Each structure stands twice: as structure tokens, then as C-alpha cells.
Amino acid sequence: MIGVLEHLQELRNILSALTCNSKVKYFYILVPLFSMSTILEIVSPNVFHRQTHYGHTHLFTESSIEWICKEFGFDLISEWWFGSDMMDLWRHVAINLQQRGGPKLHDLWSKFYLPAVDEMQLALDKRKLASEIHILFKL
């Protein structure tokens, strides 16, 4: 269910149906999280909203994932926290710079920011502050 759960209107019904299906032993999800990227979208109304896009009905948190496990009896086998918050930050600033400061300022921003993007994202990922989580569940 990679990139699926955040689009569902009746999330509880789908999760419940999984527990009733004896053929399903494991399932894997990738879902968006309430994160720094969400905050960036709130302060940048003129930049495309990736997390709070109109097609998304849910954003998840660490506690909502824990609640899902408890509510439906899922065992969380493994989790990988990694996101694109730092690229979202770059994108939001770059678009605003192009609109206000022109291409030279945009290029300068990219030149000093992009070489550090992986290290900055890793810091968020390690603290479970990433914009996405991948999870393997056992039913």
C-alpha cells in the first residue's frame, strides 16, 4: 500500500478488511507524515503543496501509527523514517526567490544549499521528523 492510505476516505474500513483476510500475513505502507514539510506548505501558499494536497485525506504521526497498531492488532516489524523535507525546503525557497529575487539569487541558494541536503535530511530522519515513513506490518 505504497502511497495509498493517505488517499482513502474510509481508512478504518480498509484496515479492518485486512485483518479479516486470512491470506494477508504482512503489508507494507508508505505514508506522509505531519512534518516540517507540512509547515512549509502553510507558510508558502503559492507553492505546490505536496503533503496537504487536496487528494490527501490523511497525514500520519508517530502516535497515529502506534494507535493503528493497537486498534487493529498489527505488529510493526520494521520502520524506515526518511523523507524529502530538505528538498521541500529547497523548493519552497527556490520558488520564492525566483518570484522575488530573480535567477541569480536562486542559483546562489542552490549552490550553497544542495551539497548539504542529504546530511540535513538524515538529521531529521534520525529524529523521526521526516515527511514520510515506510512500515512493514505483520497481521
Image (tube, grey):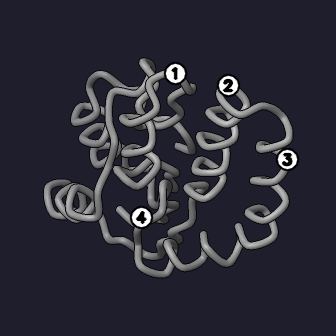
Q: Nearer the viewer, mark 4 or mark 3?
A: 3
Q: Earlier in the sequence, mark 4 or mark 2?
A: 2
Instruction: Identify the residue under disc 4.
Output: 137
Q: Amino acid at mark 3?
A: Asp
Q: Earlier in the sequence, mark 2 or mark 1?
A: 1
Cβ–Cβ under 8 Å for marks 2 and 1:
yes
Residue 73 sits in quarter: bottom left
Secondary structure beneath dot 4 equals strand
Secondary structure beneath dot 3 equals helix
Secondary structure beneath dot 2 equals helix
Q: CA distance from mark 3 to mark 1?
A: 20 Å
Dot 2: within a 10 Å radius of its alpha carbon, few (fewer than 14), some, or many (20 or more) residues? few
Q: CA distance from mark 2 to mark 1?
A: 10 Å
Q: Is residue 52 left or right of residue 15?
A: right
Instruction: Identify the residue under disc 1.
Output: 46
Q: CA distance from mark 4 to mark 1?
A: 37 Å
Which residue is more in the foreground, 61 or 114?
Answer: 114
Dot 1: within a 10 Å radius of its alpha carbon, few (fewer than 14), some, or many (20 or more) residues? few
Q: Nearer the viewer, mark 2 or mark 1?
A: 2
Q: Is residue 81 above or below residue 40?
A: below
